[in-house]
Image (tube, grey):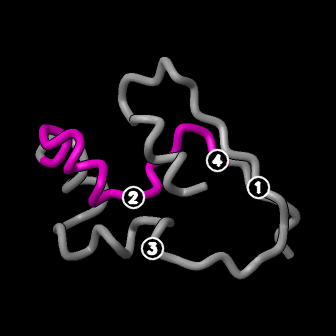
Amino acid sequence: GVRGYIGISGIYDVVALVKRFPGYREWFVEAAFGADSEWAKASPISYESKTSAPWLLIHPSTDELVDVAQTEAFA
C-alpha cells in the first residue's frame, strides 16, 4: 500500500491553473492534459483521497511557473 505522498510544486487543479495563467493553455496545458473537457480528470484536487497515509506538500514562494495557491487549495 501507499506509505506516504510527497508533492513538490504540483499542478493539482488544471482548470484553476489556466484561469490564473491563460497563456499556459496553448503552449503547455493542451499538450500535456488534452482538451479542457479532460482537465478535471487530470486534476488531483478533483478526487477524494482513499488513503490515511501522511502527505508532505512543498511549494516554494519563489516558484514562477505554478502559484502557491495550487498547493494551498490541494492541502
Measure the alpha-carbon separation of dots 4 and 2: 13 Å
> What's the CA distance linking mark 3 and mark 4?
16 Å
Residue range highlighted in magenta: 7-25
Relative to 12, is 24 above or below?
A: above
Q: Do tag 3 and tag 2 residues touch (Cβ < 8 Å)?
A: yes
**43 to 75, vertically: above or below:** below
Disc sitting over residue 55 in the figure: 1
Quadrant for the C terminus, please.
bottom right
Identify the residue shown where x is 49% and y is 54%: 73
User: Residue 49 appears at what percent x and percent y?
Assistant: 66, 76
The residue wearing badge 3 is: 46
Q: Work out how far the residue at label 1 is from the one at label 3, CA to CA, in angstroms.
A: 17 Å
Name the mark on residue 17: none
- Residue topped by disc 4: 7
The reply to whether the magenta stretch includes residue 75 is no
In this picture, residue 32 sits left or right of residue 21: right
Q: Report the Cα–Cα distance between label 3 and label 2.
A: 8 Å
The 10 Å Cα crowd at callout 2, few under 14, some 14 to 19, many 20 or more, is many
Left or right relative to 64: residue 6: right
Of the numbered discs 3 and 4, the one sitting upstream in the chain is: 4
In whole angstroms, how far apart are the C-alphas of marks 1 and 4? Answer: 8 Å
Q: Tell me the amino acid under the disc marked 4.
A: Gly
Vertical relation: 10 (above or below) 13: above
Judging by the rendered image, the residue that carries numbered circle 2 is 13
Q: Earlier in the sequence, mark 4 or mark 2?
A: 4
Amino acid of disc 1: Trp
Label 2: element kind: loop
**Sooner in the amino-acid sequence: mark 3 or mark 2:** 2
Mark closest to the chain's N terminus, 1 or 4: 4
Closer to the chain start, of discs 1 and 3, is 3
Residue 21, x across and y down, in percent: 21, 39
